[in-house]
Image (cartoon, grey):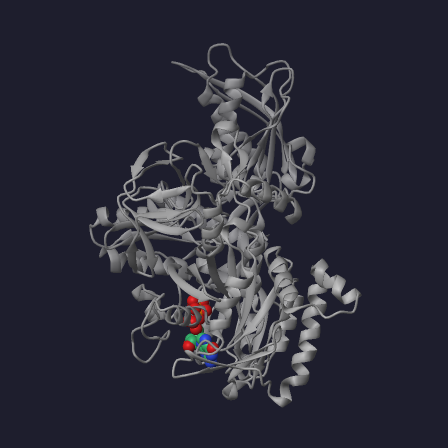
Amino acid sequence: MIFGRLPKVLGFRGVVSGGWAAKPVITACNSATTLRSARLFHSSFIRKSYEEEMVELDELNKELSADDSVRLKKIRNIGISAHIDSGKTTFTERVLYYTGRIKAIHDVRGRDGVGAKMDHMDLEREKGITIQSAATYCTWDKDGDHYNMNLIDTPGHIDFTIEVERALRVLDGAVLIVCAVSGVQSQTVTVDRQMKRYNVPRITFINKMDRMGADPWRAVDQVNKKLHIAAAAIQVPIGSEKDFAGVVNIIDRQVVYFEGSQGEKLRVSKEIPEELKEIVEEKRKVLIETLADVDDTVAECVIDEVEPSIEQIKNAIRRGTIARKFTPILMGSALANKGIQPVLDAVCDYLPDPSEILNKALDVDNAEAPVGLVAAAEKPMVALAFKLEEGKYGQLTYLRIYQGKLRKGQMMTHVKTGKRVKVARLVRMHSEEMEDADEVGAGEICATFGIDCSSGDTFTDGSVNYSMSSMFVPDAVVSLSIAPATKDAANFSKAVNRFQKEDPTFRVHYDKDSKETIISGMGELHLEIYIERMRREYNVECTVGRPRVAYRESILGSAPFDYTHKKQTGGAGQYAKVMGNMKASSLADPEDVGVSPDEDLHFKNFFQTKIVGGKISEKFLMACQKGFEDCCEKGPLIGSKVLGVDMTIDDGATHPVDSSELAFKTATNYAFKQAFLQSQPVILEPIMNVVITAPIEFQGAIIGLVNKLQGIIHDTENHADEFNLTSDCSLSNLFGFASKLRASTQGKGEFTMEFKEYQPVLPNVQKQLIEDHEKKNKEQQ
Ligand SMILES: Nc1nc2c(ncn2[C@@H]2O[C@H](COP(=O)(O)OP(=O)(O)OP(=O)(O)O)[C@@H](O)[C@H]2O)c(=O)[nH]1
């Protein structure tokens, strides 16, 4: 999957006349920033084993003071993640109510028309979906302790996947919500993968126990099998569907009923309903056995045939969860206000505090060596800006403080630019409302105003030059041309600039040939939302072109090249000769291009020089490389980006007077084109993994629809009243799919799609695309 891949980098052997450079130099294709983020991304994800991490963490935590430890133990930074429409927002609304942050519960698309608290953008309330993640601070009392929680409601739609990535990057733990009817769905698998990428421990909540067809045990089984993590229920439901009334906690065998109009009254009893006694014991056995597989203490109890104590079970769950080896499963119904408070207790009991997670930065002054961060108040301040939002009072920047503390009025250094900025105001967020704070400590999340930065930037107090490793940013797959309909260019560029800073998956560029501004992103909906936001927030009506697929160009074969660029008639002449060969990167030898043997070379570009005897000087070879990079940005077939090309220059010639950098750059451009067109060039298109869910009566209609789109069906799954279909489909066939699906299912079907891979288009499509491109070029001339 591309989502797990590094950003594209080029392998470039440094040039030393007469031999190889001692060390391969990796040069980024697009810009220095790409290289940097590639390296940051890389280094942050070459992770040690959990046990090794813990040894390092224990060492670092020796620097925590007693006060730090006490404070940190009561902090939880938690994300809520799930498949679309699983009830994250509904769940969060209950959390806010029970923690006293809101006085009344408003439902998503609720009849009161207010909308849920966390979906504060108008668009979110209208569409009933979460677009931006909103951070909220709340508190929860458990066993006489007062816990501070930062809660982030993350979107489920893949189009807003960057929001999920951002949230997970800064959180210490998560609640994974799974629907009791649909079980583990495509997006559940995606967010699970994201959690694994960021090593986020999670507890699982099976929601919608009140729905017809609710089957929590099937969901538990799917968490084990589909998410490949040891999981066991720690509750048994009392009744189901409309009779769902409460849960039995199988660890201490306590019964909890949720009563009162908002489920706010907990009635706790020791009386397990007769009909549940057997299943409680059976599931308790399953819990202990599952824990024994991941925890030595419980394993010893099982071997010695003694029942582990409640404390031993709870400790084992905590250890297993934090080590990401286990997830405890709770159940309830957010909409029916049942089962939420035990999840808050479980967050305190089983999810880690900030001192239990190893966080690292790169020391910019020390060759970007990784350094462990300590959540101690007395250490130099290090914070990560993980989200930007334009609010009533200007740009709001969300920060996670990893080390030290941040005070109102303090100066801090923006590591990327070296600029000092003042923290004029410091707030804790409660959806769109805020609470002023004078000081925020390590491990906490806060927001500040008026700071110019992009999301993912690091701030320090200036005494250290650390940079937090960057977030993974997936490639854009859809683009469209856009122009302000009115002459309001100033507001248009203001909006575009802000959206780019907020969201690295939203990209904008100006196409010189077509003289159009092109926006690109993660899907039609993603771009639609930004166009709508321009209208609403900036009063800019836009004219937009048809969505276009972000095609790529590549080669399957190889070809030599020998090109002489010569213009020696009158005035200053131009002379450059380059020779060598080009081949598909997949045919390259990993050692030759300086990457590890297990790396996938398919989509990487490499530029190498193997000149013997200094026939072309280093200066000119750098110009050749620039020419190569330009060609990779705009391929010879249809002007799309080029992937998977390995170009090597191994010979050439220079003229003592007429050779110049420009001449070598131009020669490389022509040589590239010549060799590319002879190396079985192909146009690649994005193939999407599409999962459709709809009531069972529409099964036939949907299969017909997918066949019509030439999709490949991989799997269909029938549940009590709905069915799921998983297929691969080319993105170009999917434009307008939302409305087609709506029409075929009376509006009851829904789908998610996620980029899967690039595949060559059919030859006739390639021919057509090239013709269209040439026609367009002629029109523009
Ligand atoms: N029956 C039932 N419906 C629920 C429950 N929880 C949520 N819903 C409904 O499911 C729908 C989706 O709920 P949301 O809370 O918006 O889900 P979400 O996961 O935040 O959605 P996105 O942010 O769009 O991914 C709404 O119509 C809710 O009323 C539940 O426990 N039972």
- Which one is in front, 189 or 79? 79
Which of the 4 image quadrants contains residue 454? Answer: top left
Which of the 4 image quadrants contains residue 138? Answer: bottom left
- Which one is in front, 211 or 549? 211
Q: Give the quadrant of ligand 1.
A: bottom left
Q: Can you say whether 399 is above or below 80 in the image?
A: above
Q: Residue at x 40, y 65 (%)?
A: 130
Q: Residue at x 51, y 54 (%)?
A: 353
- Which one is in front, 390 or 443? 443
Residue sitting farthest toward the right: 304
Residue sitting farthest toward the top: 656
Is 397 left or right of 602, judged from the image as shown?
left
Whether residue 5 is visible, yes or no, is yes
Q: Quadrant of the C terminus?
A: top left
Q: Residue at x 56, y 35 (%)?
A: 10
Q: Where does the image place residue 344, in percent across and percent down from the top left?
A: 48, 67
Which of the 4 image quadrants contains residue 450? Answer: top left
Whether residue 496 is visible, yes or no, is no
Is 230 left or right of 202, judged from the image as shown?
right
Q: Where does the image place residue 35, in percent across and percent down from the top left?
A: 50, 35
- Which one is in front, 305 or 13? 305
Q: Can you say whether 304 is above or below 617 in the image?
A: below
Q: Can you say whether 635 is above or below 310 in the image?
A: above
How many badges with numbers are in the image? 0
Q: Where does the image place residue 298, in percent across and percent down from the top left?
A: 71, 63
Q: Where does the image place residue 114, in percent across and percent down from the top left?
A: 29, 73
